[in-house]
Image (cartoon, rainbow, N blue to C red):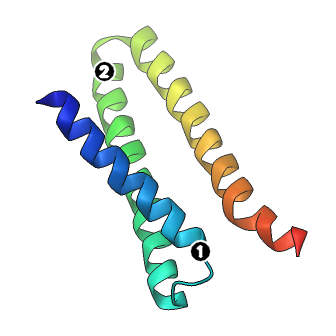
Amino acid sequence: MDFLIEIVFELIFDGVIEISKSKKVPKYIRYSLIVIIILFCVAVIGFMLFVSLSVLKQNILGGCILIILIFLLLGMVIAKIKKGYLSRKIKK
């Protein structure tokens, strides 16, 4: 069951990313999909930050490690967004 849910979410997420890159889709749909992707990433990172701050109160080392991992994840998300959407404008 977990495998099926993972496949469905992966197909939806990858489909949304590909649709948001397509020039054939109207701008308002593409921009709204981009906003949804970014909000989803921010929500996941925010939840992880909340959990890490909760862990930080109980275990300082574990909380610090989680916070460092969250900032690394945030950096990777920003790099992915720059690579996927901003570099395409430079090529043209």
Residue linked to disc 1: 22
Q: Closest to the observer: 48 or 21?
A: 21
In the image, taking residue 67 as reference, residue 23 lies left or right, namely right
In this image, 39 relative to 58: left or right? right
Q: Amino acid at mark 1?
A: Ser
Q: Where's residue 58, x and y in %?
A: 27, 14
Which percent across, then down, holds residue 37?
A: 44, 61
Tell me which amino acid carries mark 2. Answer: Val
Quarter holding the C terminus is bottom right
Tell me which residue sits at (63%, 40%) in the image.
Answer: 76
Q: Which residue bears the numbered disc 2?
A: 55
Residues at circles 1 and 2 in contact by the CB criterion of under 8 Å: no
The location of residue 31, given as percent across then percent down, is 51, 80
| Secondary structure type for disc 1 | loop
The residue under the point 89% across, 68% down is 91
Picture residue at 21% right of the left edge, 29% below the top: 3
The picture places residue 26, in percent across and down from the top left corner, at 51, 90
Quarter of the view holding residue 61 = top left
